[in-house]
Structures are given as C-alpha cells and as structure tokens.
Amino acid sequence: MSPRASWDAALDLGAPPDDRLVFRGEQPASAGTSVPLPTDLPPALTAALERSGITSLWAHQAEAIAFARQGNHVGITSGTASGKTLAYTVPVLETLLTESHSRALYLSPTKALAQDQARRLHALGLGRDLRVSLVDGDGDTGSRRLARAESNLVLSNPDMVHVGICPHHQRWDEWLSGLSAIIIDEAHVYRGVFGSHVAHVIRRLRRCAALYGASPQLLLASATVGNPHEAFGALTGVDVAIIDDDGAPSPGRDVALWNPTLLDEATGRRASRIQEAVNLVAQLVIDDQRVICFAPGRQLVELILRGVRDELTRRAPALAERVEPYRAGYPPEVRRQIEQRLAGGDLRAVIATNALELGIDIGDLDCAVVVGFPGSVAALRQEWGRAGRRQRGLGVLVLGDDALDQWFARHPQALLDRPVEAIALDPHNPEIRIAHLACAAAEAAVGPRDESILGVHITEDAEAMVQLNPDDFAMTPAGLIWTGLDDPAMRVSLRSTGSEVVTIVDSESGRVLGDVEQDRAPRSVHPGAVHLNLGERYLVTELDLKEGTALVEPFHGDWFTVPRADSTVALDEPEAEEWLGNWRCHLGEAEVATRVTGYQRRRTDDLSVIDSRTLDLPERRYRSAALWITRPPTDDEPTLGGLHAIEHLLAAALPLAVPSDAGDIAGLSTILHPDTLSPTIILHETRPGGAGIVRTAFPALARIAEAARSIVADCPCDSGCPACIQSFSCPSLNEPLDKAMALVLLDELVQNA
C-alpha cells in the first residue's frame, strides 16, 4: 500500500459533501547532491563517520564544513532532516581531535535536544578523544566540576551559561582558555525578548573566554529564516557567513488544510479545532500511522490527549495506551522515556507542544498534525517536517477560527507559497541591555576595551549606572564593577524584560503552580480571573502585586474570563516615515500607559456574555517601539469602528512578515490623536523597549496591509466576526467595530502600494 493510501481514510472524513478538507496538495520529492568526504580529515574522525554510515556529504554540508575549516563564523539554514548537525560536528570534532587543549560548547534551546546530541556523539565511538558532558539545570555541582576538568565538549543551554558559567567563569578558567568553538543549534528559536537576552548572554560568554585568551568561532544551525545574515549577526555580535542552499534529498510530502465546520454564519463560530484534531489523530492511529500532533499550549495538549485516548478506547482499545503527551513541566526522566518509546516505535502517537518542533531524533513518523497556525511559516514547516523524514509523509494544519487561519483557509496557496519570515530581535533594548551590563560588571570590570564584544553603548551606560544606582555599581580604574550584595544574573529572566514575577499559589494546598511576569499579571491573574494550569482550571481570589503573589482555588464552573483595559499612547517624533497608499506610516518610540479596568465572564459553550465586572488595579507605564499610520484630512471622517477594525486586521496579518507570539503586540485607534492631530492607528510592542518586532514589520507594511484587506474582503460574514475583524484579546472587548468602513479605509491604504 502506498503512503498516500494509508492516510486517505482520515482525510476522506473531510471530503465533500462535508468540505472540512479545504485543500490537499503535495510537495514534490527532490534528489540530493552528494560530494565525497574531505580526504584530509583525521583518520579517527573519518573512521567514526564511516562506522555511522556516513561516506559522503550533501553539497550544503560540504560548503559549510569548508567555510568553518577556514576559520569563518558560519550559519547554515536548511530544512528539517537536511543534515545540519553534521555540518558543524565535522569541523568541531576535527579541532578537538587534533588540538589537545581545544574545547567546544554546544548550546541548544532545550535540554531534550542537548540530550539527543549527547547520544549521537557517544554513538560515534571516539572514546577518550571525545569527552562529552551535559551541563544543565538537571545536573549537580559534582557533574559540573567533572565537566570542567574532563570534557572537551560541553552541551548546555543559554540559561545555564547565563546563571552557571559566566557568573562563575573563574571556576571555568582552564576550560574557557581552550574554547575554540560555540555551536548555537536551532538558532531561529532565539527571537523576540528571548533572543534579545540570549544575544547578550553570547556576548558575555565571548567576553569571559577573551579574559583567558580565547576567541571562539561561532557555528549556527537553523531552520530557514528570511534574514539569516542580519539575525545571526544581531544574535552573536559577529559577521556570520550564511550557507542557505539545501543539497539534501527530500522524500516529498502530502499537505492538507482542514477547516472545522461553520456552525453560525452570523458570529463566525466553528466546530472545535480540538475535537477535529482528536478525530484526525485517532483515525490515523487506527490506520497504522505514526503521528505527532502539535498543540499550542499545555492545556490543549492535555485536552487532545484525553480525547484521542477516549476515542481509541471506544474504537481500538489496544491502542489507547500507545498515545502519550510531551510538554515542558514533566520530569527529565519522563521526557526521556517518551522520546525513547517514540523513537523505538512503541508509541503510535504523541501530542506535543512545540518542544518537539526542534531536531530531536524521534524516529520515523508518518504524519504531523498541527492545531492552529503556529505563528510563522517557518514554524509550520518545522512541525510538518517532523514526519516523513525518510519516506513520504503527511502534514495537516487544522485551522482555528481567527482571522489569519481563516484567510489561509480561503487562500491555501498563499500559505504554502509564502517565503519564511524575518526573525526579529533587538539587543539594543535598553532594559535588556542594562540588565546584562550589570551581569557583566559582576563577572569582571567593564571598560572601553569591552566595546568590541559587549557593544558601543557600554561606556555611556556604565557612567549612567553609577549615577542612578550608586549602591550597586562603582567606577574603578579597571572599569565598572558590581558592588551589590547579590548575583545580578539571578534577577534576570531570559524570557521577560523585567525581573519581577508574581507567584501563583493554590490557597487550598499551598502548592506553587507557577509564575507570571508582574507586568502581565493584571491581565492574566486579576481577581476573578479563570487561570489554566496543566489542564486544570483555577479561580483567582487575590492578587498582591507588592508581595508578588496571586492566590487561586480549584474552579469547576462553565465560564471563562476576558479582561478589559484602557490605554493611552504618547508618540515620539518618528525615526522613519513612508507613504502607504494615501496614508502616512511612521516608526518610532512611544510612552504607553495601560490599566486593566474590568473583565467579562463568558460561557464556555457558546461564548455568550454572562456579565461585566470592574477592577481597581494600578496603572502600568513603559516605553516601547511603535508604528503608527495617520490619515490626511479629508471631507469624509472615518468611523472609530473602522479604524479599530483595521488595527485588529493589521495585528492579525503582522505574523505574515515577522514571527510574534500572542500578547507581543497591542494597539490603539483614535479619530484624533493629540500627537498627530489626525485619525491614527497605532501598533506597539508590549515589552518595555521592544524586541524588534515592529521595526522588522515596518518595511513590510504594504504586504501586511494587502493581506489585511484580503482577510476582511473575503470573509462572508455581514458585519464582522472572529474570522476577520474581531479579536479575542481585544482590551476594549471588540467595541466598536465597523467592517464596511474598514474596507473603505483599507482600499485607501493599499492603492498604489
């Protein structure tokens, strides 16, 4: 039976007259281009590769290896299963085998990926010539001590470098003195706030190595990205040579877009994407397919898992226990066991967050089902690419009911033909930059000599820090030093711009459930909010921002909450301007003031409003990056509902140009803004200082506006729905909105664009 025939039964569930299968196509197979292994590699390395079945290279691997052997910083970007690992492994192992004092550091965004790399390296059988150690949060001080003393290849992650290696570089002095290479795997993950932080961690690591006379080579591996040279330069602080061809063969893939049934034309409400995913995965498992299903968040993983097991228990009981979840939060030994069962073929399906999007070896899977557009074409390709690595596979996207997903349902080729997006990160974010300056000053005195690694701002930043925080900083002849009583690295979370968090505590058991950034707490854990944790629901009974705690209790009601907020945005003088149709576009900084003023309670089954309640919470003020568009004066005034609708549409279409996560962007619309004296639509980042998202999106505004117009023009609803102008996260609860006026104004925006 052909691979296609084996998943036809599942796809036929959505064929006419049902019409949930809105697109089925194929990505063709391609042949690879191979070249011989270099003849001058160390004999032990050549023998190890041959024992592993590697007797030749794909063309892009050979090119990357040649560049690396010449001493260049190299970034290789190619698709899944294209052999990126070998491209950086060969030059690094060559150096380790021929230079006894040489050391290398491998960084991955997840512990699981580092564990997988360790298994692959041990399998090469190089014995004492290759001494590999894992240094992460799961290890103890003894294992780290052994790694420093014995290992020539350490596998770790940015978090450990941030809090465990750089602040204690004196313990690593001998090891760092031989650091010849830093490998940054899955480099596309380092974007936004996280990427902006990691950019400074890498600079601090390079500086620590320089203290002991080392200048390591940077080797990056990544899925394809739209701006690799710019993004990897911002991430590392060095000029990176990019290898972006892909000479590996591909077995081809069937792809399908699946749109849940429309239940209510007036509201745009569709059948549950969760239940659609459950039915698809269960049918594929019954049809003897090995499946990975990606869901956006822990609670959806648990819900889909429960549904698939229930469906299999009803239809094929023997298969029900061969489906497992995979997400962050599980103990390391549980994750390792799931990975091994999946790679070994014991599991028939795994329901995962994007933790398994990365290059962990999980065996030969047949089908990848993705629930909801994952925010970027690059991420979708990565997730689909986890199946069909050795033989033809199937990739399915189960669409949600929001604007971008429904636009893809109407324009599937626009999704499949779209180039990958640019990565946005901003090492110049002042909040992040200053936080890591404190970390660097605690590691060694910071002076002008460090500008070449840490950045040109550090001298002026250092002088400002002494004046602003004399209790924590001092200027010495050697430079700026940290005089505080604690370790500043422990204050800095790599996933937020601030250091303060609110701890969420179950008031009945006293158990800590997790935490949330303090800046985001009023929206997510305000009093009366329904909070989700590991698939369980809790009701927030108290929020104490001063103490940094939110008390919750188990909740079993049939409703959820949506916060309401009021905002003002003061605009600076623009840094850049351009025309978009007959509107004027601006890029710059803004002062944002926002306050959560209340929330709605809505029924879970039909989303109807039960009631609205008020809150009295403190205002939040911060500066961030913003883009805004203004309409020149005309005789016909736009409606606020039309401007507000365009704000939603532009925010919905923005991920077509730059990957961003829910909550990264907020907006404001007004008939007359005091700083522009014109009708104005503003999109701004919600993190202090921004993370490069709007700056990356600004040059692509014409493309974003075209997509925004298409989203609303193609939507069949009469007056607006979640598939076009409504936004579930709207702080003003979608009031007011005007679809007809939005279309008129968008025509002005895209004319001559």
Image: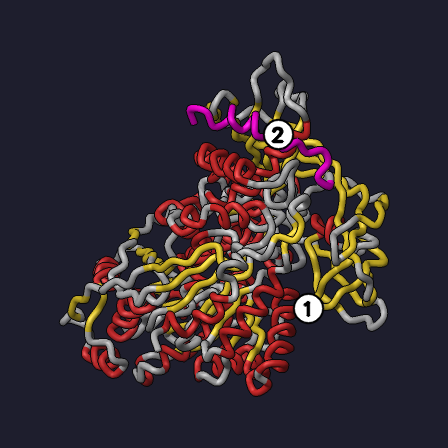
Q: Quadrant of residue 35?
A: bottom left
Question: What residue is shown at x 85% (from left), y 70% (from top)?
Answer: 508
* Magenta-colored span: 733-753
Q: Secondary structure at mark 2?
A: helix
Relative to 744, say whether 178 is above or below.
below
Residue 568 shown left or right of residue 630 in the figure: right
Relative to 531, say whether 235 is above or below.
above
Amino acid type of the residue tagged 2 in the rendering = Ala
The image quadrant where one finds the C terminus is top left
Q: Is residue 612 visible?
A: yes
Question: What residue is shown at x 73% (from left), y 39% (from top)?
Answer: 732
As drawn, the residue found furthest toward the top would be: 635
Measured as percent of width and height from the top left, residue 472 is found at 65, 49
Q: Which residue is mark 1?
A: 534
Q: Is residue 217 visible?
A: no
Amino acid type of the residue tagged 1 in the rendering = Leu
Q: Nearer the viewer, mark 2 or mark 1?
A: 2
The image quadrant where one finds the N terminus is bottom left
Measured as percent of width and height from the top left, residue 563 is found at 76, 47
Q: Which residue is mark 2?
A: 740
Q: Could you classify mark 2 by the number of other residues whose Cα lies within 10 Å: few (under 14), some (14-19), or many (20 or more)?
A: some
Name the one closer to the observer, 644 or 436.
644
As drawn, the residue found furthest toward the front would be: 17
